[in-house]
Image (spheres, rainbow, N blue to C red):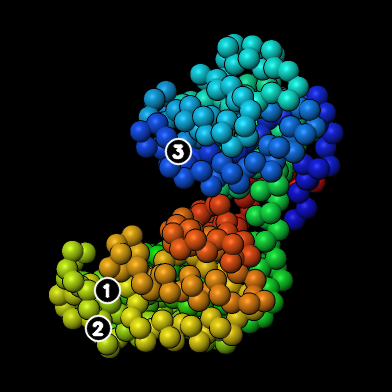
Amino acid sequence: MKIRSIESLDLRGKRVFIRVDFNVPIKDGVVKNDKRIRSSLDTINYVLSKNAKVILASHLGRPKGGPDKKYSLLPVGERLRELLNRDVKVADDCIGDGVKKLVADMKDGEILLLENLRFHKEEEENNENFAKELASLCDVYINDAFGTAHRAHASTEGMAHFVKEKAAGFLMLKEVKHLSSILLNPEKPFVTILGGAKVSDKINVITNLMKKVDAFVICGAMAYTFLKSLGFKTGRSLVEDDKLDVARQILENAKKSSVEIILPEDHVVAKDENDEPRVAPSLDIEDDMVGYDIGPRTINKFSTVIAKAKTIFFNGPAGLFENPKFANGTNEIVKIVANLKGVTTVAGGGDTVTAIESLKLEDKFTHISTGGGASLEFMEGKELPGIKILEE
């Protein structure tokens, strides 16, 4: 995959439209986590250094196809001003005569943040006329929003057809570089750690990686579907009963491919989330209990496998880590991976990233993907529309 880099374009004095991912948590009009905004600064500053006009566009949340103050990008504009230490104008829309005038009046080196793209239902519909309106605002299109690259929306795919010069920003390039390297040429042994609630969310990743990995470490609630498929009792744990045959098939395929699938061998259980947790020492879980986390034996078992790896892809928590009572398994795996030396470690998925950030271990990973769904689909081997349109 060869996508054009922002550095290959002459941006001087041009109107540069940058599709960013500013879909950040906001509470009481204040940005609560600015990681995604900070991730875009390299690209924004590079364009500013070329004395270009910077037009930024993003979605925020899931408004119902119309203006909604709760989803306004005004607080993002405020945080961006602080981070850049310069003025950022915020438009009250993303298309229309008012926006055209704001763009026409821009001087070189100025920044305009458009209002939430999803205030128009045409954005998610990838409506051609809406895409053309966005395209009319610029001379150059840059996509730096990897987190939305798996969506064929007007701002991520449609408008790029109507802008002659287009390229990927630095964040997009970084994502593609790191994910491609572990997908196409991972140093062996390659271990993939998959957690989270559902096997169904990870089937395609497992299938695509089956010929590439040496071992899958399976944790989170999805492990209970595998354990039940093997005949173990899972109590009231979350199980996808309609995926038991799929789990058996995955185990069978792994055996044929000489790939290890490592499952938990003890659990942290409770009657419900408010109950006091205890360790269930065997693979069977009592009928009235729910498995919420992996137990100490499992952590040791996983640690042994992970320690041998030279490449690791980590997506999904090991338990209900949002509840501190059941966060130990996830936290311990994060620490084990973070402390490896000379190993390529790539993590993705919102919950996984949250766990890493809460332990302040971001700097210990080779790469932390900003795109949950996008990084999973990339690892599934799917063609992402927002990247495909940037290919040379």
Look at 44% across and 59% down and name the residue there. 358
Q: Residue, x 74% and y 34% (percent of image)? A: 47
Label 3 with label 1: CB-CB less than 8 Å = no
- Type of the residue with mark 3: Val
Q: Residue at x 60, y 69 (%)?
A: 345
Q: Quadrant of the N terminus?
A: bottom right
Q: Earlier in the sequence, mark 3 or mark 1?
A: 3
What amino acid is at disc 1? Gly
Residue assigned mark 2: 280
Cα separation, mark 2 vs mark 3, equals 41 Å
Residue 189: x percent and y percent?
63, 82
**On screen, residue 222 above or below 71:** below
> Mark 2 near mark 1, Cβ–Cβ under 8 Å?
yes
Q: Nearer the viewer, residue 301 or 231?
A: 301
- Helix, strand or loop status at disc 1: strand
Mark 2 vs mark 3, foreground winner is 3
How many other residues sit within 10 Å of disc 1, few (<14), some (14-19) or many (≥20)? Answer: many
Structural distance between the alpha carbons of marks 2 and 1: 9 Å
Question: Label 1 belongs to which residue?
Answer: 291
In front of the other: 56 or 254: 56
The residue tagged with tag 2: helix, strand or loop?
strand
Residue 310 in view here: yes
* Residue density around tag 2, few if under 14, some if 14–19, many if 20 or more, within 10 Å: some
Give how far across and how far down residue 336 sits, in percent.
50, 76
Q: Which residue is mark 3?
A: 31
Circle 3 residues within 10 Å: few <14, some 14–19, many ≥20: some
Answer yes or no: is residue 156 visible.
no
Please tell me whether residue 165 is drawn above or below residue 340 in the rendered image: above
Kind of residue at disc 2: Ala
> Which comes before the other along the chain, label 2 or label 3?
3
